[in-house]
Image (cartoon, grey):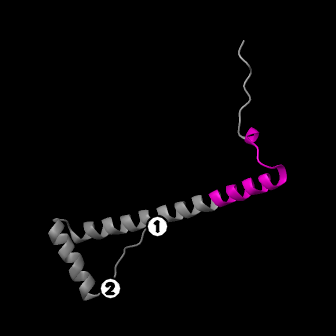
Amino acid sequence: MPSPLNIHDIGADRKAAIEMEAKQSGRSIADVVRNWIDAGIAKSRAERERAAWIAAAREGVADEARHLEQNGASLARFRQVQEPRS
């Protein structure tokens, strides 16, 4: 269930900076803050997805290293077998 966000101790400098940004961009303070929150959430999400991708890639590299250690180098593992054309 959503709850209202009410920041009491934001500080005078931050409040003034937000008000100035809203005034200069011609938007409401609420709109500016919502956009910044959305951008922060999107950045966090992208960083988590990137970290997950890197972890998966490391697993793949480790798997390939094990395969090479056991079987040696071979392109055959990656080639598709095609029937000769008549």
Per the image, the residue denoted by label 1 is 44
Per the rendered image, the range of residues in magenta is 57-77
In primary-sequence order, the first of circles 1 and 2 is 2
Relative depth, front residue between 10 and 70: 70
Is residue 65 highlighted in magenta?
A: yes
**Residue 31, numbered label:** none
Per the image, the residue denoted by label 2 is 8
Q: Residue at x 76, y 48 (%)?
A: 73
38 left or right of 54? Answer: left
Q: Residue at x 46, y 67 (%)?
A: 44
Relative depth, front residue between 3 and 77: 77
Q: Residue 17: horizontal and vertical position, in percent?
A: 23, 79
Q: Residue 14: horizontal and vertical position, in percent?
A: 27, 82
Mark 1 in CB contact with mark 2 (< 8 angstroms): no
Eyeballing the image, is 65 above or below 41? above
Q: Residue furthest top?
A: 86
Is residue 13 highlighted in magenta?
A: no
- How crowded is the residue under tag 2: few (<14 C-alpha within 10 Å), some, or many (20+)? few
Q: CA distance from mark 1 to mark 2?
A: 24 Å
Q: Identify residue type, mark 1.
A: Ser
Q: Residue 84: horizontal and vertical position, in percent?
A: 73, 19
Q: Residue 3: horizontal and vertical position, in percent?
A: 41, 72
Secondary structure under the numbered disc 2 in the rendered image: loop
Q: Identify residue type, mark 2.
A: His
37 left or right of 25? Answer: right
